[in-house]
Amino acid sequence: MKSDSSMPVSKGKVVTAVFLKDVQIELRSRVVTNQVLPFAGLVMVMFAFALDNDDVLQRVAGGLVWLATLFSLLIIVQRSFAIDTADGALDSLRVAGIELSAVFFGKAIALAAKLVALEIVLIFSALVLYRVDVNATGVVLLVTCVFCATSGLAFVGTLYGGLTAGAKGRETLLPLLLLPVVAPVLIAATRATEAAFGSGGAQTSEGWAWIGLLAVFAAVFGVGGSLAFGSLIDE
Amino acid sequence: MSQVLQRTSATGTRATKVIGALAILVMVWVVVSGLILTPQDVVQGESVRIMYVHVPSAWIAYLAFIFTAVASASWLISKKHSMGFDRFAGASAEVGVMFMAITLITGSLWGRLTWGEFWQWDPRLTTTAFLFVTYVGYLAVRRLEGSAEQRARRSAVVAMLAVLEIPLVHFSVVLWRSLHQGATVLNPNGDVKMDDLMLFTLFSGVVAFTLVFVWLVLHRQRTMLLVDIANRQGLDAAIAARKTEGSVR
């Protein structure tokens, strides 16, 4: 990132730089692909052991996909901020005098990219393991749902990850703070996914009402997060 | 600082003593009236008496969380960032969590007697439970290590985020219930015809609990001040000790 010291770096460049940094760390360390993805897959198999009924699994597949996503989200967020705090990267970004809202968006987009990869694997494992079907209109609904839900989860995850970064006992604090906040995403994304899967005789058209809720959630926490993130990590 | 310490070495003042005495008086009346004087309810029987605790504690819990949000916003907006706002926010949230726990416990006991179940996935109940968990999280954030200033900023932002979160949770739960089953036919108090004494007892309960709330918050925020002062003095003492060590050498 070359820049004249008198010229502040543009926000877009910071977003891209932070995003690329996080993605590059993932590409080199392969923590999401080698650890979190297998973990999520394992959770899907464990659900099948626990519920032990093909009809029930088919009925609740949507909910299980999003529950596994939320569990994995906790791990990914913790990992993402553990790297930054361990090397003092967040402190360096702060003293660099760049806009912290840009850091927020950069990290959120990187988190969203990891989540999308995860969700694709989870949805495919639901198709295979739980024998759900999706038709063409269902796919459109599902893709929109994944996009909106992931945006919301990425914003909230980055925000609360930043809050608990560097704090003692963050492993236990993050779930307590994050899970109640993402409850609307779990409800809405699950219902939309069930509509796409046609679980319990649900129609695809029923799912679209939930997409609105997901979009509102993402917008609220996108704006709220970009305003609050700076003061949460600025200490 | 020693002046401040002297001034606040006890958390009671004349005002809090008056409030405390009034709270006890009104509470005694609520207990006597609620348990003995008021009649049974035609439909609910004796279980209606839970209402004299349940409704006021729910009211106080919501009041406390609104108070926390207002105090947190005031801390963020005010230029001086007065720590008083932060202490009031924290004290109010602590008391609010306690009253919300009482609300949930008494509510589920009442539910068991009236509906035959401890819990219903009613939007109001579900949102209340989420509110409870959210503020337990808020209290955990207040306990993170760091200076008083850091604690104030972090917790104020988290309190503001809770204000964003709660309407979204409530709206999503309402939508969830309404799309999945007909609006749950739960109207705990709306269709209950109350006689005057019952209504007056309920009102007295609200007054008594409000007094208890004010009393608790005032004392709690003063103990928080003392803790902050003690922490600062501990640090000052440690620095002075190291300095004298250095000069001896």
Image: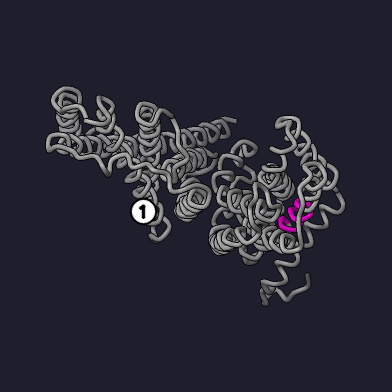
- Left or right: A144 with respect to B212? right
Residue B55 appearing in the image = yes
Helix, strand or loop for disc 1: helix
Way the structure is coloured: one colour
Amino acid carrying label 1: it is Val
- Residue B154 versus residue B233: which sits nearer the camera? B154
Image position of B50 with respect to B176: above or below: above
Residue B229 rendering spot, x and y as whole percentages: 40, 37
Residue B156 appearing in the image = no
Chain holding disc 1? B
**The C terminus of chain B lies in quadrant:** top right
- Left or right: A54 with respect to B228? right
- Left or right: A146 with respect to A168? right
**What span is in magenta?**
A111-119
Q: In the current view of this chain or complex, which residue is farthest to the front? A: A201
Q: Tell whether position B224 is magenta.
A: no
Residue at (69%, 37%) from the top-left corner? A56
- Residue B93 versus residue A188: which sits nearer the camera? A188
Residue B145 rendering spot, x and y as whole percentages: 55, 39
Q: Quadrant of residue B94?
A: top left
**The N terminus of chain B lies in quadrant:** top left
Mark 1 surroundings within 10 Å by alpha-carbon count, few (fewer than 14), some (14 through 19), many (20 or more): some
Residue at (66%, 63%) from the top-left corner? A105
Residue A82 rendering spot, x and y as whole percentages: 71, 45
Residue at (40%, 47%) from the top-left corner? B86
